[in-house]
Image (cartoon, helix red, strand yellow):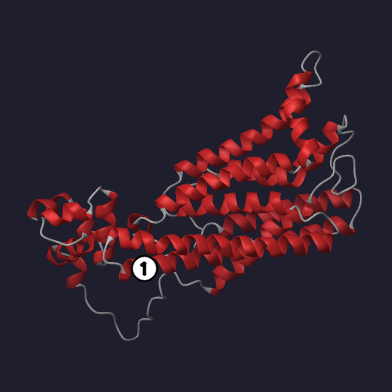
Amino acid sequence: MKGLLHRHRDLCERAVDPLEIAAGLEAHGVTDRTAARFRHRDVFSLAEEMYARAPRDRDTRAPASPEEPSAPRPGWPRTAGIVLALLPGVLCAAAVAGLRLTDGRPRLIAAAVGILAVTLALGAALRRGPLSAATRTTSTWTCWLVGYALLGDGLLRTAVGGGPDGLPDGTTDGPWPVSLAPVLALALSFAPAAGCAHLFAAGARRKLASSRGLADFSASVRPLLLGTFALYTGALTGLLALTGAVLGESAALAQGLSLGALLLLARLLTVHGHAYAPTLVLAAAATAEAVALATLFGGRLPGCGFLAAPVEALVTACGPAGVPTVACGIGALTLLVHACRRLTRASAHASTGRTR
C-alpha cells in the first residue's frame, strides 16, 4: 500500500474526495482485480483507504469566516450561464429576421453583422458552462460543417445543374440558395445541448458516488448517456420542424439531426477529456463534404466526368442533403459508439462536476 500511495502521491494530495482517486486509479489502469491484491473488494474501496492515509493541506486550513459568502454549488448552471446559452439562438434568430426584412446592400450588412454576433456569442458560451473545454482543435471543422449546412446544399443543387450563376444573396431562391432553417435550429439548440450536458455530468457524478465498482458504474451511466443523447435529438427535431415551418423552408430533419448529433457528441467527448477522436471524426466529415463538392466541379473537366458520377447518383437518389447526412451520420454513429466506451468510465468524470 505504501508503494501505491507513493506512485499516486500527487493524485491523493489533490483529491477532494475518494471518488476522484478512484477515477484517477482507473485512468492509470488499476482495476478491481488489482485492488483485490491489496485486500480490497474494488477500486472504490481501495481509493477510500488511500484518501484516508494521504496527507492533505486542506486539513489544516482555517475555517471560513461567517461573513464570507458560501461558494455556489459546483456545476450548477448560473443565471449568466443560462443567458449565454440562450444568446446564440436569439442572435441567430435576429440575424435571420434581418435577412428576411432587408434587400441589397443592407442585407449584406445584416448578414455580416449577424455572423459576427453569433460567432462571438457562441465563443463566449463555449468558454463557460457544461460545454466549456480548454481545447479549440475542433473549431475549424465545426465552422466548416455549419457553413456547409448554410450554403452547401444550395451550391450542390445548382452545381448539378451547371451553376452556380452568382454569389449567395441570403435568399432561398437566388442563384446560390441558402438554408436558414437548419442553422437557426442548431443555434437555438445550443441551450438544450448545454442543459443536457449539465444533466449528464451531474447524473454521472451521482452515479459515481453511489456505485461500488467500475463495472457497476459503467452499466449505470450508459443509459444516462443514451437518454441524454435522445433528449437532445428530440429537442432538435422539434426545433427543426418549428424553424422550417416559420421560415417556409424544408425542415431538413435528416441533415440537421445528423449534424447536431455529431456536434453534441464531439463536444461531450472533448469536455470529458477525449478530444482526439472528435477531432478526427469532424475532420473526416468536413473532408467528405469538401471532396463531394470538389469531385462535382472536377467532373466538368474534359474526360473527368466519372469523378462526379458517385455524387450525382447520391443527389439523384437522396437529394443534396444526402451528402451531409451520410457524412455527418456516419461520424455521429462512430462517436456514439466511442462515447459509450469512454464516457462510461469513472476517469471521464473525475472533475467535471466542480467548476464548470
Query: Mark 1 = which residue?
Result: 207
Q: Give neighbour class at mark 1: few <14, some 14-19, many 20+ (Cα, 10 Å).
A: some
Image quadrant where residue 117 sits: bottom right
Front residue of 297/319: it is 319
Residue name at image x 24 percent, y 54 percent: 25
Q: Residue at x 86, y 59 (%)?
A: 248
Q: Say which of 23 and 317 sits in front.
A: 317
Quadrant holding the C terminus? bottom left
Q: Quadrant of residue 246?
A: bottom right
x and y percentages locating residue 194 in the rendered image? 55, 63
Q: Is residue 263 left or right of residue 118?
A: left
Q: Is residue 334 above or below residue 79?
A: above
**Does 325 sit left or right of 126 as displayed?**
right
Q: Residue at x 51, y 38 (%)?
A: 280
Please tell me whether mark 1 sits on a helix, a strand or a loop. Answer: helix
**x, y percentage for residue 151?**
77, 43
Q: Give percent across and percent down for residue 255.
A: 70, 49
Q: Residue furthest top?
A: 303
- Residue 263 vs 216, above or below: the answer is above
Horizontal placement of 92 versus 162: left or right?
Answer: left
Instruction: Note whether 145 is above or below 211 in the view shown.
Output: above
Is residue 22 visible in the rendered image? The answer is yes
Q: Quadrant of the N terminus?
A: bottom left
Task: Tell me the kind of residue under disc 1.
Answer: Lys
Q: Residue at x 70, y 31 (%)?
A: 292
Q: Is residue 128 visible?
A: no
